[in-house]
Amino acid sequence: MGSVLLIEDDDRIRLSLTMALEDEGYTAHGVATAEEGLVAQRSDPADTVLVDLMLPGMDGFECIRQLRRVDDVPIIVVSARDDTHDIVAGLEAGADDYIVKPVAVKELAARLRALRRRARAAAPAMTVAAFGDLEVLPEAGEVRLRGEPVAVTRTEFRLLCELAEHPGQVLSREQLLQRVWGYEIGDERLVDVHVGRLRHKIEETPGAPRHLMTVRGLGYKLQR
Amino acid sequence: MGSVLLIEDDDRIRLSLTMALEDEGYTAHGVATAEEGLVAQRSDPADTVLVDLMLPGMDGFECIRQLRRVDDVPIIVVSARDDTHDIVAGLEAGADDYIVKPVAVKELAARLRALRRRARAAAPAMTVAAFGDLEVLPEAGEVRLRGEPVAVTRTEFRLLCELAEHPGQVLSREQLLQRVWGYEIGDERLVDVHVGRLRHKIEETPGAPRHLMTVRGLGYKLQR
DNA sequence: TGCCGTATGACAGTCCGATGACAAACGCTG
DNA sequence: CAGCGTTTGTCATCGGACTGTCATACGGCA
């Protein structure tokens, strides 16, 4: 049905929640620290993450930001702190939902379902996108140029995927900053720099840029 | 930034929330009944809907189900009822989030942002406006003449889009200044200059201007 | 013909995108 | 946990494209 990663330092809560989630039909995996959670999500990505805010070592906010850099997994904060300030901070850090302890399992399950419904609809199952001699394989985390794999960094890859998911459509720097970096605001030159780096890797022709196009005043687009 | 439809029967709450949302930068529109809300969403879709559960006539749950049949707009329940049963029912009916009254505006704003961030990834919908051999593709930031892309600057593009959105309708220089440049007042000759530049690019025929017409004393129009 | 509104070409200031350099952060390895 | 190569974000700079203004030429209409 689905897998959930629970990052929560209180042993009792962690155990009872994992059990409750498994009763609801999820494959649940619990860890006690943010660091462990990040490792777990990197090696074996769950498709939803629950994270407590009060954690030893790296706190929950930082954990959320780091998770966002790993992938676009839906994140729900589960915290005892119920003041508006924490809720806002959690959501701004990149969480999708915030639930206050003590947790009603039925509510948690319903929120999980709602979030997964939304996240699933948003993720167009793209297995491969081809732009002339350029292929993007999101599942495999690979980019090929004329069939040959090209070494691309994670950020470059995310950027390319984002562009590839909307072929021929202009994406503004602002949109790209939000979707690739998760920034609400930020220096838009950052996008330029990464586009430039990407171009060096995926466009060998010294002539006009073929696929990764600049649309002056609007943004960038990837076209066939 | 974004538009929000608020379905809430209590006048005081509705008004204060719409105002608060507008302070946050949203275009907010409030209605008092589910029926009105459905009509509003059908005629002029907002990109997020807030709905109260206790409504006269059609209740909130049914309203959510109906909204879901209209489009895939993100929905947040705003309700005074805080028991798990209602939360679960609201989310199961198709809502994306559930917030309990009294509402902390900052939290609502944060939840709106989180939801929109998540929901934004979808929505392809490519629209094309065609005028004979001239095509305007707003999504792609592109203009084509006989299928061939034409290099157009940002201002020219905006101008063309504005004209293309009202086919056959005369737009005054004042209207164009306002909509393309955002100027309340300004030198109307500016429009002429850009129309001229645009014509050179999209009309190769040395004869009579075919699509981008001057209407003496009134303004310009784009016709098929 | 005279008038008023429109078209056009030139120009200088400004804006925008590309790029290379650099320092900090990261992540892998021993 | 220390070291090292890689990746990332910031910055300054450059060249070119774009924009708005102006002066002037054109053209329809009374």
Image: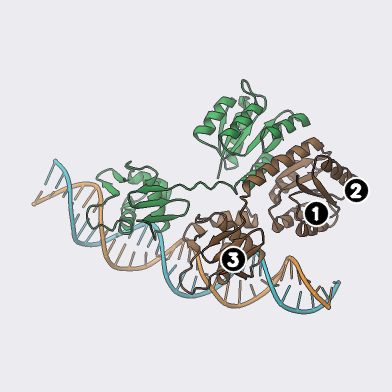
Chain colours: A brown, B green, C orange, D cyan
The Cα atoms of the two marked residues, 2 and 3, are separated by: 42 Å
Q: State the residue position of label 2.
A: A11
Query: Which chain does the residue under circle 2 lie in?
Result: A
Residues indicated by labels 2 and 1 sit on the same polypeptide chain: yes
Residue A59: mark in rendering: 1
Near-viewer residue (B178 or B168): B168
Camera-nearest label, 3 or 1: 3
Near-viewer residue (B90 or A77): B90
Residues indicated by labels 2 and 3 sit on the same polypeptide chain: yes
| SS for dot 3 | helix
Residues indicated by labels 3 and 1 sit on the same polypeptide chain: yes
Which numbered disc, 2 or 3, marks the residue that appears first in the sequence? 2
The Cα atoms of the two marked residues, 3 and 1, are separated by: 29 Å
| Residue type marked 1 | Asp
| Residue A107 lies in quadrant | top right
Is B119 left or right of B166, judged from the image as shown?
Answer: right
The local crowd at label 1, few if under 14, some if 14 to 19, many if 20 or more residues have their Cα within 10 Å, is some
| Residue type marked 2 | Asp
Q: State the residue position of label 3.
A: A194
The residue sitting at 64% across, 70% down in the picture is A151
Q: Quadrant of the N terminus of chain B?
A: top right
Res B77 seen here: yes
| Residue B202 lies in quadrant | bottom left
